């Protein structure tokens, strides 16, 4: 077969008409449907007419275009969606029944079989086809309108089943306007050079593919997709488990990586790996993405694991991020009901300007008390962690008077054990008389510090008992003492550098997984939006979410992270690829903003009902439920004007390794 670009450059009408594949005539047509009369012999010569296959209808003679009237210079594209009843069908059915009633044997003698005239009449049948559009030429370019301009009731349109190059042209058609915009899109996204379309699979109409794919006369037709369709767009990969969703996502990751390599651009990719199949090699896929791109992949996991970065937050180092998690946990547990808890969740850990000496010193004391509270609540500190703050001589003297042993000067640093003893003693001293401040008229212990010390001591006043530091226990599982930077910012830096980040979410608490995942998604969106607002260019980022119904619920508010990424992310160069088997569980805003669809087998009518609201998927409802073949997908992309049934190629990790090796040698 010719190169795909050579075929598409010669898109003239005669190329779509293959007289050897004649299958019949239209006997009725309107703006939505065409009814076609066909014959068993014609169908056999054209390798059958599978359900959902493409047909073309025209009155053009490809060998005599010069004498064709101008009004006839168009080709109507059809899709077979069912059978149609011919006027004489009832009479033929009676003939068949009478014939069968008179038969005495299972295999009758041929000489006593039905007569030739009747046999010929029985071979005719009708097809119901949906009108997909009209091909026509303008200058030297082929155009496809998404409808028909008019129809002649008396017209006799010849109908053909396209094969080979004609079918390649149909399934890979991109209109001239979109071709031009793809160049602009590539430039806008920072991609240099000519970005070539990539093969995603081959045309496959039905699960039973004996004639149209396996017959020696059949020609396998390749289906290509434009890379620019995915960048800064939304893509759905839908289907039941083990029907090829993960394979499709691996294909996308490899294509985006190839585009980035060839265009010398940085395109970050982050995969929310619910089942751990991208981060870890398994027998079925013969290689994980991390093995294929060892120098470009960073893996994260909730637990400490060799080869993985820590996904959790260090509450001692990332103060505001950790405190934000504590606030959310307390609110989720409905603990913000007492005065001291309300005071605690409203405290600020923001660092003031160091030139504001009094405020800065108070902040140092507050941070030291907060870290001490974390320590007594069970948050394991980083090795050798110490706190420092200033206390005037009078305060130190009063504190040491209450301590059971002499305590070091806090400005020289305290261990967290010493800090606990210091603040407990400071609390006792302050109960007797407010500790004096040497720099202002304010008391040394303000309301915020008093709340923190009360929680450390689990007391209010002299004897009132409170839960104190124990209310922080639910947040301990989000903490890791091994982190040195905030995980979401670190991941964003990797993505900005064009790395592939895999979040292995197959281990750890499901609730933590959801919250950490959303936190990272929010950071990606917020950082890219801030860069855009500042007038700079955000990095290209592709976000892949497996089992998306677990993270992107139907009941989410439009102001939440994932609906906002789906609706606004394209503006900030954020692409969203989500995979799920529960279409009906997805947020409707995300579905409504999806440009690309890859759909395999779905097993119930509710999911199909949700799906058929979009594009022309209604034509494929029955086959989506019935056909369970792995990788048999119905594909609608941004550039494609209609849905195409495709057998998705199997991802080949060895071939991709070889490509990467050759690229790195350049």
Image: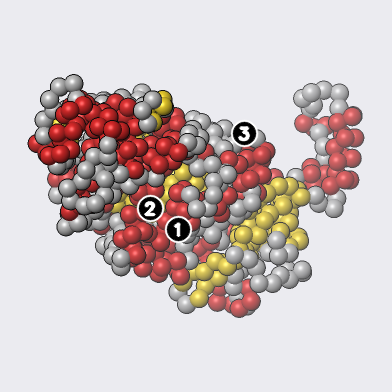
Q: Residue at x 41, y 25 (%)?
A: 465
Residue 126 vs residue 227, the one in the foreground: 227
Label for residue 150? none
Residue hosting label 2: 525
406 in relation to 558, above or below: above
The spot of residue 541 in percent (x, y) is 34, 51
C-alpha span from label 1 to label 3: 32 Å
Of labels 1 and 3, earlier in sequence is 1
Q: Are marks 2 and 1 in contact (CB under 8 Å)?
A: yes
Mark 2: secondary structure:
helix
Residue mark closest to the camera, 3 vs 2: 2
Q: Tell me which corner region of the image, top left, top right, bottom left or bottom right, holds residue 206.
A: top right
Q: Residue at x 49, y 30 (%)?
A: 242
Residue hosting label 3: 603
Residue hosting label 1: 568
The spot of residue 207 in percent (x, y) is 58, 36
492 in relation to 502, above or below: below
412 in relation to 223, above or below: above
The spot of residue 527 in percent (x, y) is 33, 54
Residue mark closest to the camera, 1 vs 3: 1
Q: Are marks 3 and 2 in contact (CB under 8 Å)?
A: no
CA neighbours of label 3 inside 10 A, class few (<14), some (14 to 19), many (20+): some
Q: Residue at x 83, y 32 (%)?
A: 112
Q: Residue at x 36, y 68 (%)?
A: 184
Q: Tell me which corner region of the image, top left, top right, bottom left or bottom right, holds residue 649.
A: top left
């Amino acid at each position: 077969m010719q190169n795909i670009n050579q075929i598409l450059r010669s898109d003239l009408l005669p190329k779509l008409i293959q007289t050897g594949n004649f299958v019949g005539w239209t006997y009725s047509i309107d703006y939505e449907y065409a009814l076609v009369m066909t014959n068993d012999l014609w169908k056999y010569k054209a390798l059958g007419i599978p359900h959902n296959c493409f047909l073309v209808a025209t009155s053009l003679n490809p060998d005599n275009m010069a004498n064709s009237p101008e009004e006839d210079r168009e080709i109507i594209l059809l899709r077979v969606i069912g059978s149609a009843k011919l006027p004489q069908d009832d009479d033929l059915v009676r003939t068949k029944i009478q014939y069968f009633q008179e038969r005495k044997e299972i295999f009758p003698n041929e000489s006593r079989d039905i007569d030739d005239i009747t046999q010929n009449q029985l071979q005719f049948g009708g097809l119901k086809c949906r009108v997909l559009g009209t091909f026509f030429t303008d200058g030297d370019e082929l155009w496809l309108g998404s409808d028909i301009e008019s129809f002649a009731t008396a017209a006799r349109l010849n109908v053909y089943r396209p094969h080979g190059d004609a079918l390649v042209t149909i399934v890979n058609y991109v209109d001239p306007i979109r071709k031009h915009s793809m160049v602009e899109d590539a430039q806008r996204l920072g991609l240099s050079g000519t970005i070539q379309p990539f093969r995603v699979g081959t045309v496959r109409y039905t699960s039973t593919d004996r004639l149209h794919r396996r017959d020696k006369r059949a020609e396998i037709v390749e289906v290509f997709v434009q890379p620019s369709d995915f960048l800064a767009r939304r893509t759905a990969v839908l289907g039941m488990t083990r029907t090829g969703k993960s394979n499709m996502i691996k294909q996308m990751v490899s294509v985006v990586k190839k585009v980035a390599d060839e265009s010398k651009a940085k395109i970050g990719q982050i995969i929310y790996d619910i089942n751990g199949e991208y981060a870890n090699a398994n027998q079925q896929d013969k290689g994980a993405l991390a093995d294929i791109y060892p120098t470009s992949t960073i893996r994260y996991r909730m637990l400490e694991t060799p080869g993985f970065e820590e996904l959790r937050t260090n509450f001692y180092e990332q103060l505001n991020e950790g405190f934000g998690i504590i606030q959310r946990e307390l609110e989720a547990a409905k603990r913000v009901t007492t005065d001291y808890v309300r005071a605690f969740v409203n405290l600020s850990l923001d660092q003031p300007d160091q030139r504001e000496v009094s405020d800065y010193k108070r902040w140092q004391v507050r941070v030291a008390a907060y870290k001490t509270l974390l320590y007594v609540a069970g948050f394991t500190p980083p090795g050798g962690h110490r706190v420092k703050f200033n206390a005037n001589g009078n305060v130190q003297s009063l504190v040491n008077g209450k301590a059971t042993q002499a305590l070091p000067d806090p400005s020289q640093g305290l261990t967290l054990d010493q800090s606990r003893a210091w603040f407990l003693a400071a609390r006792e001293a302050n109960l007797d008389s407010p500790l004096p401040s040497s720099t202002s008229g304010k008391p040394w212990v303000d309301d915020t510090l008093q709340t923190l010390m009360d929680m450390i001591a689990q007391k209010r006043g002299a004897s009132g008992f409170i839960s104190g530091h124990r209310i922080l226990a639910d947040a301990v599982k989000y903490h890791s003492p091994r982190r040195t930077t905030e995980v979401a910012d670190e991941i964003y830096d990797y993505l900005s550098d064009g790395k592939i980040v895999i979040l292995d979410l197959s281990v750890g608490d499901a609730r933590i997984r959801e919250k950490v995942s959303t936190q990272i998604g929010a950071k990606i969106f917020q950082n890219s939006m801030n860069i855009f607002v500042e007038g700079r260019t955000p990095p290209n980022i592709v976000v892949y979410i497996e089992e998306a119904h677990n993270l992107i619920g139907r009941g989410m508010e439009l102001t939440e992270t994932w609906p906002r990424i789906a609706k606004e992310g394209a503006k900030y160069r954020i692409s969203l690829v989500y995979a799920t088997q529960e279409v009906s569980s997805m947020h409707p805003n995300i579905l409504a903003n999806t440009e690309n669809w890859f759909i395999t087998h779905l097993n119930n009518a509710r999911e199909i009902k949700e799906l058929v609201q979009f594009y022309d998927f209604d034509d494929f409802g029955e086959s989506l439920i019935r056909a369970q073949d792995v990788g048999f997908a119905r594909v609608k992309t941004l550039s494609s004007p209609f849905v195409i049934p495709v057998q998705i190629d199997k991802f080949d990790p060895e071939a991709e390794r070889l490509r990467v090796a050759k690229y790195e040698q350049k």
